[in-house]
Image (cartoon, helix red, strand yellow):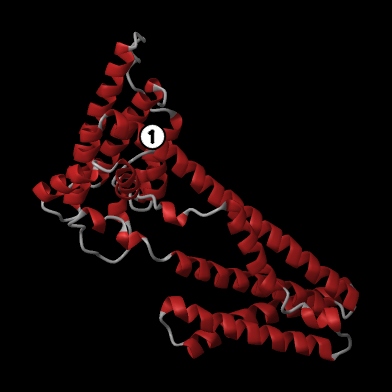
Amino acid sequence: MSDPYESWQEEKRSAWLYRVVADCERGTPRASLFTELAQAADEQAELWLDIITRKGGPAPTAFHPEVRTRVVARLTRLFTPRAMRGVLAAMKVRGMVIYTKSAPHAMPTRLDDIGKRHQSGGAGNALRAGVFGVNDGLVSNAALIYGIAGATQEPSVIVLTGVAGLLAGAFSMAAGEYVSVRSQREMFEYQIGLERDELEEYPQEEAAELALIYAAKGMDPVEARRLADTLMQDPERALDTLAREELGLNPDELGSPWVAATSSFAAFTAGAVLPLLPFLFGSGSQTLIESVALTALGLFAVGASMSLFTGRHAFLSGLRMLAIGGAAGLATYFIGAWMGVTLG
């Protein structure tokens, strides 16, 4: 079990932030949801206070939001709860799932329906990340190589620059992806630990919160409460659903930080190596032309692949990516040529 003092503090912080969100949503049906969630959080804080008292511990002093909480509240008022939903979820503000941009879906009517809509999309997200990683490597390293090629015709300098750009970019992308996924996982593990403790201490209160969220999403209140109560009979399923519906967290989307970092490194490298290959295995005046041709082919292929996610025509998407990447390469080439003349 977590520290009762910490759990009391978490619930009071959540209640305070719920009221901030409710104030931001004044005049909408969501205001009522977050006001009720604030009241539920206050009631759960009282339950933790009762545990503290039974253990003979001193009662905590009145709640005063710390600096981090006040900063989050100010940003929420400034940028709206929808824009801040990820930060609010990390602060244990439940109900952020109502701000997701996914298409409307049918509410679950049976226990077996819960979570089914979350079981797809992982492969598609991985493919999207891979395509964009290849694109990042291709455009950035091509622009770097052609900028140097505009300034000097020395093959060794171009190769050294291309290899350095490839490694620097790939390691940077991998490090960023590792930190991002690791941070997400740590946040999830912390929040799910709190939910597990609360589910053990007061399952009926957790069921009431879940029913409020289902009702806010359009379900009949009586049916929402019946479904929430049924869900609580299976603790593991209940914990998974509480994470999804109350906190807006999807455990299926949190992979291994090492896998994410390795995939990011490989995708960036696959793109960044294309403009470099002709310089690695050839020399002479034709090398630059071969590099441009290979890069153009890669840009068109990446653009066409993006049509899988945008719904645009593959040919037009490929031409658009070719135009964007080509403009970047031309710009850096002429800038490099100008600087080569100026500094030479």
Depth order, front residue of 56/109: 109
Specify the quadrant of the image occupied by residue 137: bottom right
166 vs 18: above or below: below
**Residue 338: where, in percent of width, then height?**
79, 77
**Residue 9: where, in percent of width, then height?**
37, 25
Depth order, front residue of 339/5: 5
Kindly tell me whether residue 25 is visible in this rendering.
Answer: yes
- Quarter of the image with the N terminus in it: top left
20 vs 159: above or below: above
101 vs 153: above or below: above
**Residue 98: where, in percent of width, then height?**
27, 53
Q: Which residue is mark 1?
A: 194
Specify the quadrant of the image occupied by residue 300: bottom right
**Residue 155: where, in percent of width, then height?**
88, 78
Residue at coordinates 52% horizontally, 84% vertically from top-left? 304
Residue at coordinates 61% horizontally, 63% vertically from top-left? 263
| Kind of residue sitting beneath label 1 | Leu
Kindly tell me whether residue 84 is visible in this rendering.
Answer: no
Residue at coordinates 42% horizontally, 45% vertically from top-left? 87
Q: Residues within 10 Å of mark 1 (few under 14, many from 20)?
A: some
- Quarter of the image with the C terminus in it: bottom right
For the image, the number of numbered tags is 1
291 vs 3: above or below: below
Callout 1: helix, strand or loop? Answer: helix
Residue at coordinates 77% horizontally, 77% vertically from top-left? 276
Depth order, front residue of 289/176: 176
